[in-house]
Amino acid sequence: MKGLIQTGTMKGLIQTGTMKGLIQTGTMKGLIQTGTMKGLIQTGTMKGLIQTGSMKGLIQTGTMKELLQTGTMKGLSQRQRNEP
């Protein structure tokens, strides 16, 4: 419960981390995400989309249909940065 570390695979998903500040890394349908519960940082590829960011002030950068977009929402490119 406190500081639980679990490692394993579930349909290609590999997650390792702890209850406090869960860090999970793995692949799910080509998606690789790594981060923590507080300020989740996920990096990976999903249909050619690479997104990296955090829960507070999500920053995502990647390519979709050979387009470079930073912080995309419904095909609208926008940048937003929030101080921690």
Image (cartoon, rainbow, N blue to C red):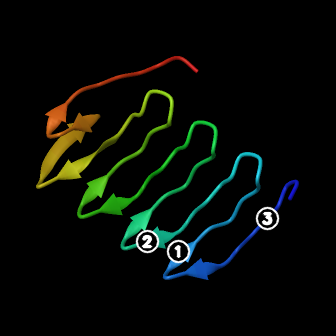
Q: Is residue 28 above or below residue 34?
A: below
- Specify which label sits upstream in the sequence, 3 or 2: 3
Give coordinates of residue 7: x percent, y percent.
71, 73
CA–CA distance in space, label 3 to label 2: 20 Å
Residue located 18% across and 32% down the image: 77
Residue type pointed to by label 2: Met
Q: Is residue 31 above or below residue 61?
A: below
Mark 2 secondary-structure assignment:
strand
Identify residue for label 3.
5
Hey, which quadrant is residue 34 in on the image?
bottom right
Contact (CB < 8 A) between labels 2 and 1? Answer: yes
Q: How many marks?
A: 3
Identify residue for label 2.
28
Residue type pointed to by label 3: Ile
Hey, which quadrant is residue 53 in on the image?
top left
Horizontal side of residue 48 vs 51, given as left or right: left
Give coordinates of residue 57: x percent, y percent.
44, 27
Horizontal side of residue 36 vs 56, given as left or right: right
Residue type pointed to by label 1: Leu
- Position of the N terminus, as image quadrant, is bottom right
**Which mark, residue 63?**
none
- Specify which label sits upstream in the sequence, 3 or 1: 3
Mark 1 secondary-structure assignment:
strand
Identify residue for label 1.
13
